[in-house]
Image (cartoon, helix red, strand yellow):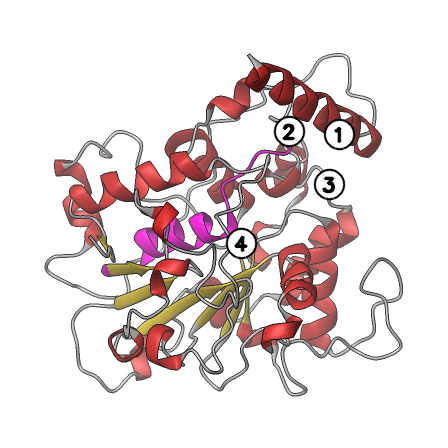
């Protein structure tokens, strides 16, 4: 059938893209999956009686779920030993595409705020025992949902990529506690959604920025933004310090996902059949998937909005689309697999997924 031919064409194209990007592979390639990870004993920030992680052992996710996987990386993670280990994995899954000086910039993430997801929880006045998170994707299912108020009433609100809020507050809310992005996805969103008024990451007193690093660029931008210095080389270079996160952003506002965390999500939660094809080197969980799974590993309760549901054909791709666009599938993600995972997590009672039907 034609499907195989077009798949073949896609995979050939992917192969040629990949071979142009990658240095020649070493004769003995290390284990591609690397299903062994650093461990972090980050104590739980609450003693919530009914949190997600207490419920995991009673579900089909018991075996795959690692309770001490590091979700975030910070200054302590940069050691020569870790550099040797993580250099074997490319893209978002390791430090293979990152120069030593790039990873070295983790050294500036040395405040308590950089290592804890909820760095201000102790000072929050709500007296709750449990951290309740709203994780908001950009799916068209939110258009006309009037879920904004409910989303904003959570302790924390996670958003991703082209999170356009102005004019859509009734449906999606107006607060952003955590904005997840890679430099590449953020720049693409700014280009693509400029016409609906999206100018860049949300900026507010509570907003924290979580890089999903899949390139040197992410480490370089993170360092320049936190130290208010210009970027001298690469696609983000400029005469002035980067202004994406506001003029007076401080290093406490930045977090960065650990590549072991992204690799663990790929290996265990989203082990797609794409990993058996020529696109395996560019395949990774979508940025929204990393955000939602990070919330499951850190929040006590997770309500997910704007993620793909089985009736996705009824909605436009994004809630802010002016004209209706069908959902767009990319070669480097497996959105249908992600959609099935959201259903399974919802049915297991680990998340509460907003569905229209």
The residue where tag 2 is placed is 281
Q: Nearer the viewer, mark 4 or mark 2?
A: 2
Mark 2 or mark 3, which is nearer to you? Answer: 2
* Residue at 44% over, 56% down: 316
Camera-side residue of 84 and 131: 131
Mark pair 1, 2: CA separation: 7 Å
Give the mark nearest the N terminus, 1 or 4.
1
Labels 3 and 1: the sequence-earlier one: 1
Tell me the element at label 1. Answer: helix
**Residue receiving disc 1:** 18
Is mark 1 in CB contact (under 8 Å) with mark 2? yes
Please tell me how crowded label 1 is: few (under 14), some (14-19), or many (20+) other residues with Cα within 10 Å: some
Question: Which residue is identified by label 4?
Answer: 73
Q: Residue furthest front?
A: 323
216 or 108: which is nearer to us?
Answer: 216
Where does label 3 land, which residue? 97
Q: Which residues are magenta?
A: 282-301
- Image location of residue 139, percent across then percent down: 42, 58
């Amino acid at each position: 059938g034609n499907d195989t031919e077009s798949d073949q064409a896609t995979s050939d194209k992917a192969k040629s893209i990949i071979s142009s990007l990658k240095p020649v592979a070493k004769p003995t390639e290390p284990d591609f999956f690397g299903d062994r990870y650093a461990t972090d004993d980050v104590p739980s920030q609450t003693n919530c009686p009914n949190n997600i992680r207490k419920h995991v052992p009673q579900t089909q996710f018991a075996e795959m779920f690692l309770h001490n996987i590091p979700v975030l990386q910070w200054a302590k993670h940069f050691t020569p030993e870790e550099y040797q280990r993580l250099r074997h994995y490319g893209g978002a899954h390791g430090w293979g595409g990152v120069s030593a000086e790039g990873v070295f910039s983790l050294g500036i993430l040395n405040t308590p705020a950089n290592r804890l997801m909820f760095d201000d929880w102790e000072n929050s006045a709500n007296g709750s025992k449990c951290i309740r998170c709203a994780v908001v994707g950009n799916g068209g299912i939110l258009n006309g949902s009037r879920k904004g108020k409910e989303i904003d009433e959570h302790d924390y609100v996670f958003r991703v990529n082209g999170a356009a809020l102005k004019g859509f507050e009734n449906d999606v809310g107006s607060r952003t506690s955590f904005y997840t992005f890679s430099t590449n996805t953020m720049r693409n969103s700014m280009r693509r959604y400029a016409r609906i008024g999206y100018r860049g990451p949300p900026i507010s007193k509570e907003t924290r920025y979580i890089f999903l690093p899949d390139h040197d660029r992410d480490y370089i931008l993170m360092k320049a933004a936190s130290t208010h210095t210009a970027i001298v080389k690469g696609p983000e270079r400029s005469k002035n310090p980067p202004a994406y996160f506001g003029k007076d952003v401080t290093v406490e506002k930045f977090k960065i996902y650990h590549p072991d965390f992204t690799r663990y999500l790929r290996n265990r939660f989203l082990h797609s059949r794409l990993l058996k094809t020529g696109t395996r080197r560019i395949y990774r969980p979508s940025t929204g998937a990393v955000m939602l799974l990070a919330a499951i590993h850190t929040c006590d309760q997770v309500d997910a909005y704007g993620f793909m549901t089985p009736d996705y054909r009824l909605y436009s791709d994004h809630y802010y689309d002016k004209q209706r666009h069908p959902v767009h599938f990319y070669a480097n993600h497996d959105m249908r697999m992600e959609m099935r995972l959201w259903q399974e997590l919802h049915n297991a009672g680990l998340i509460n997924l907003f569905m229209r039907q």
